[in-house]
Amino acid sequence: MIKEAILEAEARMKAAVHALEEDLSVIRTGRATPALVEKLPVEYYGTPTPLIQLASISIPEPRQILIKPFDPASVKDIEKAILTSELGLNPTNDGKQIRLNLPALTEDRRHELVKVVHHRLEEARISVRNARRDVIKDLREFEQEKLISEDDLKRAEDDTQKTTDEYVEKINAIGAHKEKEVLEV
């Protein structure tokens, strides 16, 4: 019973770290990466479809993304999705493929991106702490219902705190790496 509760909390913490990694992969650094546009929703025959399902995405140069749609008729839809997205990129369309040239980041823009990274890190930490709070609440209910002893409760709370600390450390390490990557010129 105790192990299941702690394992459930750990699964939620793992999911929070995974979601953080997904979020941070979209934040732009100085280099082009397919992750910037892979999940971009494109209106394709009336259905929002991730770009990765509509085109092959490659990086021919360090600051350029090349998008080759599988269906040439979708070029306009993809171009429209890029223009309306928050990426701030201007696509170059030659009728068959789309090129995205990534301008160099200014110092101010880098610092804004670092603030975004810190915000996402804090959201992930909050998610991990919420998982800890929920499992400790469940454990205390178990103890009140006399399903576990007070000693078991104390041990389980300590184990939960150790797990929480591990995941917060992972989040901090991921954040430090991404911040270094963003500030790199």
Image (cartoon, helix red, strand yellow):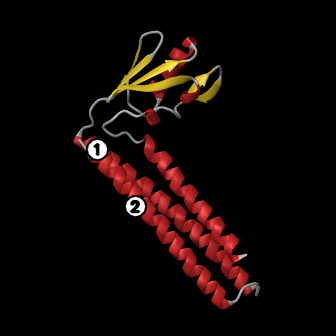
Q: Which type of secondary structure does the marked residue at label 2 adopt?
A: helix
- Label 1 and label 2: CA atoms lie apart by 19 Å
The residue where tag 2 is placed is 172
Q: Nearer the viewer, mark 1 or mark 2?
A: 2
Say if residue 71 shows up in the picture.
yes
Q: Where is residue 10 in the image (x, y as percent from the top left)?
A: 59, 65
Instruction: Indicate which disc, 1 or 2, sits on the residue closer to the N terminus.
Output: 1
Task: Residue type at mark 1: give it.
Answer: Arg
Residue 47, quarter of picture: top right
Name the foreground residue: 115 vs 182. Answer: 182
Q: Where is residue 44 in the image (x, y as percent from the top left)?
A: 61, 21
- Label 1 Cα neighbours within 10 Å, binned few <14 / some 14-19 / many ≥20: many
**Residue at the spot 56% in from the left edge and 62% down from the top edge:** 13
Using the image, determine if residue 21 lies above or below residue 154: above
- For this orientation, the residue located farthest to the bottom is 150
Using the image, determine if residue 148 lies above or below residue 12: below
Q: Position of residue 15 (x, y in %)?
A: 57, 56
**Residue at the spot 59% in from the left edge and 27% down from the top edge:** 53
**Residue at the spot 54% in from the left edge and 57% down from the top edge:** 16
Q: Position of residue 156 (x, y in %)?
A: 61, 80
Task: Residue type at mark 2: give it.
Answer: Asn
